[in-house]
Amino acid sequence: MSEVLLFSPIRTGSTLIYNILKHLKFIVLKRHLLKVMPKIKNVIITYRNPLDSLSSLFLKENMNINSLTVNDLNWGIDTLKEQGLDKLIKIFNNEKFLYLKYELFVHNYSYIYKKLEKYLNITISSKDKTDIYKKFNINSVKKSIKRFNNFLEWDKNTLLHGNHISKYNGDSHYKKTFTKEQINYITNKLTTHLTILNYKIENT
């Protein structure tokens, strides 16, 4: 079996890709923290608009986003940066890696299959595609994690946690959760990251 390094900032959909790769019999090293790149041929990276990742982080923690203090926002931003985001912008656009943009794959499994087939030089059977979607589509995952009380409880095989999926079901939601002032503050803090990752910087 081939090894794959799956690196990602937190809250960028990496658990879905992890389970797809595991289903396809790959050995997956899943990492959010990465000081040194291991010597592995296949490196797959998921990424997402940092504002949505940050909103998702606060929702996962059951924090009231509208009442967040500056200290709360800074905690979230620092956590996001430390757990993958700062490392990502240092290695972004390395042609040897496969980059999967969350907004393009979260509701489009065909996109995932095509990217994986080309990068890993494999063919994913129709049966595997059907089985993967049946088990790991958003509705199936939400049903499977109902048994968990919170994010501190998880399935050790799939790495799916309680409260893993928000009520927004993977759609962009930061404009619905953050105030304009919060968006401006976060954007100012993450301008470099947004620019390198090619996300639009919106001044509200």
Image (tube, rainbow, N blue to C red):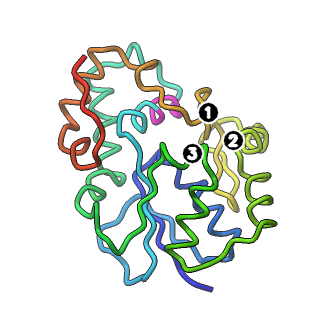
Kindly identify which residue carries mark 2. Answer: 138
Residue 121: image location, x then y, percent: 55, 80
Q: Residue at x 35, y 75 (%)?
A: 96
Crowding around mark 3 (Cα neighbors within 10 Å: few <14, some 14 to 19, many 20+) is many
- Amino acid type, callout 3: Val
- Amino acid type, callout 2: Ile
Q: Which residues are the magenta region? A: 56-61
126 vs 14, left or right, is right
Kindly identify which residue carries mark 1. Answer: 169
Q: Picture quarter containing residue 25?
A: bottom right
Q: Picture quarter containing residue 73?
A: top left
Earlier-in-chain disc, 1 versus 3 = 3
170 vs 192, left or right, is right
| Element carrying mark 3 | loop
Q: Is residue 128 above or below residue 103?
A: below
Residue 181: image location, x then y, percent: 26, 15
Crowding around mark 1 (Cα neighbors within 10 Å: few <14, some 14 to 19, many 20+) is some
Earlier-in-chain disc, 1 versus 2 = 2
Kindly identify which residue carries mark 3. Answer: 106
